[in-house]
Image (cartoon, rainbow, N blue to C red):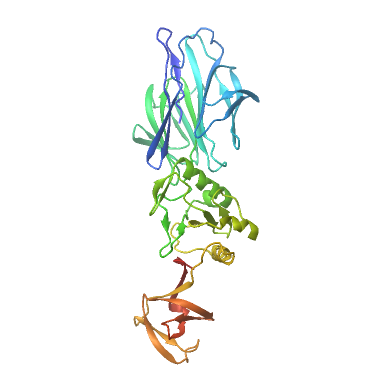
Amino acid sequence: MAVSTISSDDKKPLSTALIYFLGILGVGLVVFFGGELLRNLSGLSNKAVLNVVVQNGKAEVMVNNTKVGETPFESKEIKPGSNTIAIRSDTRQYQTEIKFLPSKKDTVYTVSIARDLGVSDTFSSGQDMWFDKDGSDNTLRIVSEPSGAKVIIDNSEVGTTPFTSSAISNGSYSLKLIYPGYETGDMRINVQSEYVLNISAKLFPYPVVQEIKMFEGSNNLYNISIDNPNVTADTQAWVKGIIYWNDTRGLNVQGVGMNKDRVFDYFIDYKGGIYDKDGNLLASQEDLKKLTNANRGAYLGTSSEATGITEEARKALELLGDSGIKPVEEEIAKIKTTPLGWLRVRKSPDLNGEELTKVNTGETYDVLEKASGWIKIKVSETLEGWVSDTYVELSKGGVPL
């Protein structure tokens, strides 16, 4: 994140290190830009300064629909007043309108914009910083998306966004914006009395849990279910967000560890959508042929507490199996806890059926057939029979159904 500064000293070289921090799953990425902000104030009267950086790649910088350069970008020739600033990559654009204050003989105002353009409006982040003079005693004003983020200044919690304060005196401070389920905004700021430092920040939502685990009993299907409805609403954007996070931050996968190599060959969401490793929706049997060599998959559900997958996702897994893309394991019946610690196996699917044997709580068996309220299991190579589905938990490939 960038530090927007105001400087006033006509005897010393004016300089600042504009520091951009992005917390990446506990690892700080630090980007320096700006260097010596200003050495000579002559000729800058009635002009303003703009600094722009982007994370992960380069982008064009537009001022009032005119291209002025590429990131990292700095200009000391910005016209004071309201200006429209646009940052454009090959696939994404961010645009904002900010009022630039005119520089004076010994005072320069800097507008700083730092963005991670990401892959969508949801899966992106950044902050704009600028000074204003509104006649109040306020020295700091912060808004964030999402609203309600904790404001931590020099390791002390001072409130939540939207946040305004007149108690922050001149000086340099560390600032963190913390909201559950989102990447922490971490930056340094310089506060100047008689001016309001405005910060408009957007936090990047975590598209995955901190450690991605395989479904118990499965060999190749991982659970990426998450609780944030802002993340899960648009599943295709979510898949793209996961891939982007994989490429830029890395995924922490059980049995694989933290890395930025592409982890998953395909994705299945709770709606039954199937996506390839690049996040493209596969809508036909012909499309599914792209997954011929697919191995490791990920399930995208709407609850991190859930241990199973939706019916729609289950059908999608079966569709993959029917297409010959990947083996879909047979259904398994696990005997639940019963009052007696065992369950009768009957010759026919009814309470009057002849009892063939008993099976114990916790044991698992292949499922052969289903009837209303009953499940036929393979007890041994020579014995099969029916058990009440009340005391059976079904799974496929280790994934509860």
Image vertical order of residue 326 relative to residue 373, above or below: above
Image vertical order of residue 294 relative to residue 33, above or below: below
Question: What is the quadrant of residue 12 in the picture?
Answer: top left
* Total residue callouts: 0
- Residue depicted at 64% across the width and 60% down the height: 285
Compared across the picture, whether 253 is left or right of 53 comes to left
Q: Nearer the viewer, residue 58 or 162?
A: 58
Image vertical order of residue 361 relative to residue 225, above or below: below
Position in image of residue 233 (x %, y %):
56, 52
Position in image of residue 132 (x %, y %):
51, 22
Q: Nearer the viewer, residue 30 or 220?
A: 220
Asked if one can make out residue 290 in the rendered structure from this viewpoint, the answer is yes
User: Could you tell me which quadrant the N terminus lies in?
Assistant: top left
Question: What is the quadrant of residue 286 in the picture?
Answer: bottom right
Position in image of residue 47 (x %, y %):
56, 14
Position in image of residue 389 (x %, y %):
47, 79
- Residue depicted at 55% across the width and 47% down the height: 240
Image vertical order of residue 197 relative to residue 208, above or below: above
- Residue depicted at 45% across the width and 78% down the height: 390
Asked if one can make out residue 64 in the rendered structure from this viewpoint, the answer is no
Q: Residue furthest front?
A: 293
